[in-house]
Image (cartoon, rainbow, N blue to C red):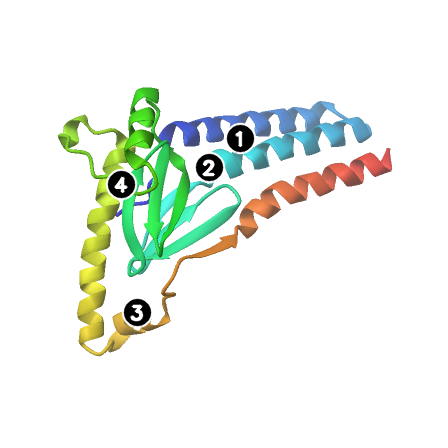
């Protein structure tokens, strides 16, 4: 499976990055002094925010599991721990009795969100009985992830039954057995570096 993203958010993110680049070029050509440096740092902060909120988030299925890349943190769910994927207001991954939410993949229709939340209660939302041609993009993503999980678990089970030999067996042996969540260093740099620059400029004024 290819990485799952929100096209509209990515388009908005790249549009804002282009605007920031043009504004920074104007500052370089026409600006001078600490005020221009401060304005440039603020623009870089907004570009970092666009990256973190719109460009970075995605859902990445891999050979060993699925990675939820959210604005500041990444969660990796191995296929062995994956139990279900559903949709309330966002795509959710169920694993080891926990629920992990995906930032970019969202249900946009309010009526469907209310229906999903009602059906969810305290547990997973059942798979919708709908024609794939009428399903929303996020419901299709959840369906595809469930199918991918079944296929990958069958493959991993076959490798383990075969003794875990070869490169595939090494991947199975080294993959984490439960979900793991870590901070995204690129997100922290994208936000922290321009903020640090702004602080330095303000101290120089």
Badge 2 is on which residue? Answer: 55
Q: Quadrant location of the C terminus?
A: top right
Of 61 and 44, nearer the camera is: 61
Instruction: Return the disc, 4 or 3, that comes first in the chain's sequence.
Output: 4
Distance of label 1 from label 3 (alpha carbons): 39 Å
In the drawing, does residue 72 fall left or right of residue 192?
Answer: left
Question: Earlier along the polypeptide chain: callout 4 or callout 1?
Answer: 1
Identity of the residue drawn at 22% across and 73% down: 160
Q: CA distance from mark 2 to mark 1?
A: 10 Å
In primary-sequence order, the first of circles 1 and 3 is 1
Distance Cα–Cα, label 2 vs label 3: 30 Å
Q: Residue at x 42, y 32 (%)?
A: 10
Q: Give left or right: position of 139 versus 133.
A: right
Q: Position of residue 187 (x, y in %)?
A: 55, 45
**Hey, which quadrant is residue 174 in on the image?**
bottom left
Query: Which quarter of the picture shows residue 197?
Result: top right
Residue 17: mark: 1
Q: Could one spot residue 36 in this view of the protein?
A: yes
**Image height of 178 relative to 198, above or below:** below
Outermost residue toward the right?
205
Q: What residue is disc 4 on?
A: 142
Name the residue tied to disc 3. Answer: 172
Q: Please identify the quarter of the rendering in which residue 119 is found.
A: top left
**Residue 118 picture location, percent across and down:** 31, 30
Q: Residues within 10 Å of mark 4 (few under 14, many from 20)?
A: many
């Amino acid at each position: 499976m290819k990485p799952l993203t929100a096209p509209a958010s990515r388009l908005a993110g790249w549009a804002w990055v282009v605007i920031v680049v043009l504004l920074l070029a104007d500052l370089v050509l026409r600006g001078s002094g600490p005020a221009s440096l401060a304005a440039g740092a603020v623009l870089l902060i907004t570009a970092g925010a666009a990256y973190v909120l719109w460009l970075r988030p995605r859902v990445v299925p891999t050979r060993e599991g699925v990675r939820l890349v959210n604005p500041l943190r990444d969660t990796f769910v191995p296929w062995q721990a994956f139990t279900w994927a559903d949709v309330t207001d966002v795509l959710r991954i169920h694993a080891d009795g926990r629920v992990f939410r995906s930032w970019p993949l969202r249900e946009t229709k309010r009526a469907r969100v209310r229906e999903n939340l009602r059906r969810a209660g305290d547990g997973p939302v059942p798979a919708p009985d709908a024609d794939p041609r009428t399903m929303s993009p996020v419901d299709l993503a959840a369906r595809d992830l469930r199918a991918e999980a079944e296929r990958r678990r069958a493959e991993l089970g076959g490798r383990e039954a075969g003794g875990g030999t070869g490169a595939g067996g090494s991947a199975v042996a080294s993959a984490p057995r439960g979900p793991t969540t870590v901070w995204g260093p690129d997100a922290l740099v994208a936000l922290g570096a321009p903020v640090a620059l702004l602080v330095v400029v303000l101290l120089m004024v």
